[in-house]
Amino acid sequence: MAKKLDKVDVVTVGVGWTGGIIAELTKEGYKVVGLERGGDRGTEDFHMVHDEYRYAVRYGLMQDTSKETITFRNKRDEHALPMRQLGSFLLGEGVGGAGDHWNGHTWRFLPYDLEIKSETDKKYGKDKLSDDYTLQDWGITYDELEPYFYKFEQITGISGEENPMGAPRKNDYPTGPMKSTPILDRFKKAAKNLNLHPIQMASANLSEAYENPDGETINACQYCGFCERFGCEYGAKSSPNITVLPTAKKNSFLMKEANWSK
Ligand code: SF4
């Protein structure tokens, strides 16, 4: 029988990056409940478990597609069918969601990306795209978003260096770029010989220990290489579980396991 719970200000469906960031509303005194279909987990769950069969092959942190999945079609007139095998789109499950098993690439959108329709019209003329194109501007510009990109980078401690081809930044990255390796050094040298500008890309795998503005600590990466498909056993890869959620839990955030796929 349905159980009626006390009303709260905000309910998030899912507790990954999006739900976790919204849970930060607790800092402003709002009551937030997060509904999560998978279990809670943290850095302690990943200690000494570089189990490639469990995580990389059997997708231990992903949605069980035999029970619930997305449907997909290639053309409008096709019948959308359930995908029972994961491909490049890895659906997360459990607290932290895909933010737990991501590899940490942290690109910003370019100004062009957010105004793609206007910029395309400007470049090729208004008649270039036919009416059935669904291309649209986002309705928000890069300049408007820039402070929020930075806020995310501050909360997660993103490591990086100036990218001459990247979107303009008003502030440096909170932490410096990751260490290079001998093979990367060779690659950079070869790229520079071709007049290219190699950079250490921005990453949520932190080059040094960092305390974020909420007082949460993210550790320095140990370069173990088990990022994508794994949780970080060192607490060195920014995830909702070690940044926004501990902050929200110190306030009035409540997590409810919904477990509707089980
Ligand atoms: S220690 Fe570094 S390389 Fe290893 S999982 Fe954590 S962030 Fe990734």
Image (cartoon, rainbow, N blue to C red):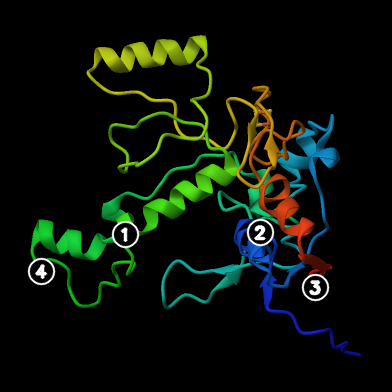
Question: Does label 3 or label 4 sit earlier along the sequence?
Answer: 4
Q: Which numbered disc, 4 or 1, marks the residue that appears first in the sequence?
A: 1
Q: Quadrant of the C terminus?
A: bottom right
**Relative to 115, 90 lies left or right:** right
Dot 2, how many residues are within 10 Å of its Cα: few (below 14), some (14-19), or many (20+)?
many
Secondary structure under the numbered disc 2 in the rendered image: helix
> In percent of the image, x 85 and y 88: which residue is there?
4
Q: Nearer the viewer, mark 2 or mark 1?
A: 2
Looking at the image, is mark 2 or mark 1 earlier in the sequence?
Answer: 2
Q: Which residue is mark 4?
A: 126
Q: Nearer the viewer, residue 258 or 173?
A: 173
Tell me how far mark 1 sits from mark 3, CA to CA.
35 Å
Q: Which residue is mark 2?
A: 20
Q: Identify the amino acid type marked 3.
A: Trp
Residue type of the residue flagged with mark 4: Lys
Residue 147 horizontal/vertical position (percent): 41, 52
Give the SS element for disc 4.
Answer: loop
The amino acid beneath tag 2 is Gly
Ligand 1 located in image quadrant: top right
The amino acid pointed to by label 1 is Leu
Residue 132: % across, % down: 24, 77
Q: Which residue is mark 3?
A: 260
Secondary structure under the numbered disc 1 in the rendered image: helix
Q: Are marks 3 and 2 in contact (CB under 8 Å)?
A: no
Q: Nearer the viewer, mark 2 or mark 4?
A: 2
Return the residue found at the far right: 1
**Residue that badge 1 annotates:** 114
202 vs 241, left or right, is left
Q: Earlier in the sequence, mark 1 or mark 3?
A: 1
For the residue labelled by badge 3, is the local secondary structure a helix, a strand or a loop? loop
